[in-house]
Image (spheres, grey):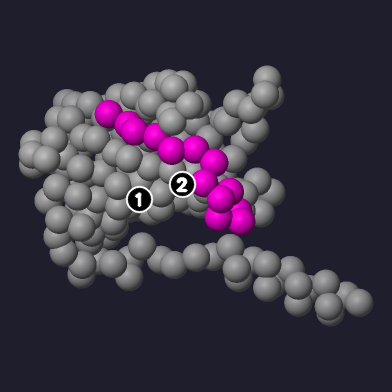
Amino acid sequence: MKTLFCGLLLALLAGCAGPDVQQYKAQQPALDLAAYFTGTTDAWGMFQRRGGAVQKRFHVVITGTSTDGALTLDEQFRYDDGSTQRRVWRLTRAADGRWRGRADDVKGEAQGELAGNALRWQYTLLLPVDGSTYEMAFDDWMFLIDDCTMINRASMAKFGIELGQVTLMFRRRACGP
């Protein structure tokens, strides 16, 4: 019984590992987070439940400003049901090249690692649902496609169980329609 339990535990932990962002270090174009997000960026996305059903769609207008080595992203969400939300990220680049970030609805500090065209961003989002707030673990991946376009896919989990995914497509306004 003990051997079976240990085997199941190891399988569960291996399933949580995921890919290493460093496997993308040679991919081009290289993502410069501050350069990409400085200015205005639009994003269109959706949240899908674990089974694949789309629960919400949304549009985000992101205003990015870069000053003194810090990047601020002011995100204005509009959901398909007409509701709105605002999140302001304050990001800094650490000496080791990783990114750190804070927002009012993020517990603690978000951790980001960038390599080549990819950024892996991990954080705990405080998600309000029906009068309660849930701590949801996000494993967020961004991939720069070209100088204007980026694709984002995030897995949302609670107690290690994936509850859904968020998919976004970003487009810098400086690039035109």
User: In whole angstroms, how far apart are the C-alphas of marks 1 and 2?
Assistant: 8 Å
Which residue type does callout 1 highlight?
Answer: Asn
Left or right of 69 in this view: 163: right
Q: Is residue 135 above or below residue 67?
A: below
- Please name the predominant secondary structure of the magenta segment in the image: strand
One can see residue 71 in this view: no
Percent coordinates x, y for residue 121 in the rendering: 40, 48
Residue at the location (14% across, 30% down)?
39
Disc 1 and disc 2 in contact, CB within 8 angstroms: yes
Which quadrant: the C terminus?
A: top left
**Which residue in the structure is indicated by mark 2?**
166
Q: Is residue 158 above or below residue 130?
A: below
Percent coordinates x, y for residue 132 in the rendering: 68, 24
The region drawn magenta spans 49-61
**Which residue in the structure is indicated by mark 1?**
152
In magenta segment, residue 85: no
Camera-side residue: 143 or 18? 143
Quadrant for residue 175, please give it. Answer: top left
* Kind of element beneath mark 1: strand
Q: Estimate how packed mark 1 is, as few (under 14), some (14 to 19) or many (20 or more) residues with alpha carbons within 10 Å.
A: some
Percent coordinates x, y for residue 127 in the rendering: 57, 31
